[in-house]
Image (tube, helix red, strand yellow):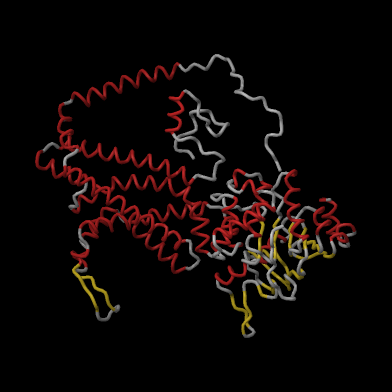
Amino acid sequence: MNSPDQGEVTPGPPATIKAVPVRHPGRWAGAVVITVLAAMLLHALIFNPAFEWNVVGTYLFDSSILRGLGVTLELTALSMVMGVLGGIILAVMRLSPNPLLSATAWFYIWVFRGTPVLVQLVFWNFLGALWPKLSLGIPFGPSFWSESTNSLIPVFTAALLGLGLNEAAYMAEIVRGGIQSVDEGQGEAAHALGMSRFQTMRRIVLPQAMRVIIPPTGNETISMLKTTSLVSVIALEELFRAGQNIYSRNFQTIPLLITVSLWYLFLTSVLTIGQYYIERYYGRGTTRTLPPTPLARLRGLFAGKPVPSGRSDVVPGLEGGGHV
Amino acid sequence: MTDLAKPRTSGEPMVKAEGVRKSYGLVEVLKGIDLEVEQGEVFCLIGPSGSGKSTFLRCINHLEKINGGLLSVDGELVGYAMRGGKLHELRDREVALKRRDIGMVFQRFNLFPHMTALENVIEAPVQVKKESRAAAKERAMALLERVGLADKAGNYPTQLSGGQQQRVAIARALAMKPKLMLFDEPTSALDPELVGDVLDVMRGLAEEGMTMIVVTHEMGFAREVGDALVFMDGGVVVESGHPRDVLTDPQHERTRAFLSKVL
C-alpha cells in the first residue's frame, strides 16, 4: 500500500567526501601521558617482589579456591533467583489495589532495605538463639512437627536467606520502577481485550518492563557476586573465605587477595557480557533494527567491510556498546 | 471476506445510557448523558476536546467507572449487576468477561510493542478465549489480509507506519469477535495521507453491519457512514440526529460554532 521505494534511487555506494579531517593533537598528548603512567604501574606490579606472582599462580587453581569459587557461584545464582522472584512478587503486591497486600510489601521492603545485609546474615545464622526449635502446628495450639533451628538452617541456608531476602527488597523497587515505566495504554488495551489483571501483568506489562528491569538487575547480580564475600563472617567457605583460610596458614596475604580478586574480576567480566546479550533480547521491538553485536562488528572489521550500523543517524563507532 | 460471525444479541439497544455521570475528584466530566445506540448502527460522537466524548466511550467498556446513572450494553449493565433490586459491583473477572465482546481501538494504537503484528492479533484469542494457536493464527491471518496487511504479519509495531499500526489494532479487536466496536479518535494521531486506509477498513466493517461507536473529528466519515450522530460539549449531549441533518443544518448555537471551526 505504502511502498517506501517509489522514487528512483541510483544504485551503488554514495560518493565519498574528500576533506581534511579534524586533527586532535590533545589526544596524542593524552595518549603519551597515559602510556607512561600505565608503564609505571605495570613496572610496579611486576617488579615489586611483595606481590609474589608465583604464589598467585600456585593458588589460582588450588582445589580449595576452586571449591570456594563453586560455593560463591551457587550462592550468587540462588540468591539472585530468590531476589528476582521475590522482587517481582513484592512489586506486584506493592502496586496491588488490595491495601493489605501493598502494606505487607511496603513493610517487608522497609525492614529488609533498612537494615545492613551483614547484620541480616549474622541474624539468620543465630536464629537458633532466638527460637531453638521451629515447629508446625495450630497457631497458639498444639504442634505436629518440630525441628531444631540449627539443623533446619545450616550455614549455607542462613547465607542464602540473608542474601536472597535482602536482595528481594531491592529488586522489588527495581521491578516496581520497571512496571511503572510501561505506558498506561498498554494495560488499557489488554483490559479492553478482556485480559485479567494477572494475564495483563504476565503477558503485556512485565515483558515490557523487563527492558527497564534488566540493566539494574545485571548490576545487582554483579554486586551480589561480590557481596557473597560477606558470608565469610558466618564461616561459610566461599571464594574469599577459602583465600583467607590459606593465608591464615601461610601468611601470603597479598598474593592470595590478588588470586581471589582475579577470580572476582573474571566472573564479573563474564556476567557483563551475558548482561549485554540479555538486554539485546529484551530490546527487540523497541528499535527498528538492533545494532550489530561487538563480535559481529569485530568480524566485519577483519573482513574489511563496514558493518551496517542499523541506525543511519549515528556516527559509526559511537553507537555505544550497551545501548539497545 | 472474513467471517465475523455475529454473536447472538438481545432485542435491546446495543448501548443504552440514562443520566450517566462521571467525575474526577470535584470535576464533573459527564453531566448526565442519555442516549441509545441501536444494533448495527454506526454512531458518531463529535465535540470539542474536553467535552467528555472519549470519557463516555471508555465508560462503555468500564475502563472508567461511572459515578451515576445507568449504562448498559446489549441489555446488561456495565460494571454492575442488579440483584434483588440492588446494584452490586462486579468482580474484575466478571468485568473482563464482558469486555471480550466489546472491541476497542485507541487513538495511540496501543499495540503491544514486544509482539509482532500476528502475535498482537492472536494474543487475546489464545490467552482469554483459550483458542488453539493454530486456529487463532489462521483467523488472524485472514483478519490481517482483510485490513490489507497480510505481508506485515511478522513485523513489530515500530516497523509499521501509524496507519498500518492502527489497522493491526483493528484486526486485534476483531479477533475477539466483538458485537460492538468502540473507536476512540482512531485517525487523530495519523498523518493525513494515512487516514484514508484506516477509514476504508472502518467503512467495510460498517457495511457488514458491525455496531460501531466512533469518537471522531472526521466529519466526512460521519456524514457518509454514520447512521446517528451526537454533538457533545461540556459533558452534556447538545444535539443529536442523523449526521446529514446535524452537520448541514445544526439547530443549536454551540453546534454551529463548533462545526464552523472544523468543517
Residue A176 on image: x %, y %? 46, 55
**A133 up-or-down from A3: above or below:** below
Q: How many marks?
A: 0
Q: Residue furthest left?
A: A249
- Quadrant location of the N terminus of chain A in the rendered image: top right
Whether residue B145 sits left or right of residue A17 in the image: it is right
The residue closer to the viewer here, B75 or A143, is B75
**A72 up-or-down from A259: above or below:** below
Whether residue A59 sits left or right of residue A177 in the image: it is left
Q: Residue furthest right?
A: B249
The residue closer to the viewer here, B133 or A177, is B133
Q: Residue at x 49, y 40 (%)?
A: A324
**A239 up-or-down from B206: above or below:** above
Query: In which quadrant of the rendered view does residue A87 lie?
Result: bottom left
The reply to whether residue B35 is in sight is no
Q: Residue at x 43, y 29 (%)?
A: A299
The reply to whether residue B168 is in sight is yes
The residue closer to the viewer here, B188 or B9, is B9
Residue B107 on image: x %, y %? 67, 53
Residue A46 on image: x %, y %? 21, 25
Q: Residue at x 33, y 20 (%)?
A: A35
Residue B206 on image: x %, y %? 76, 60
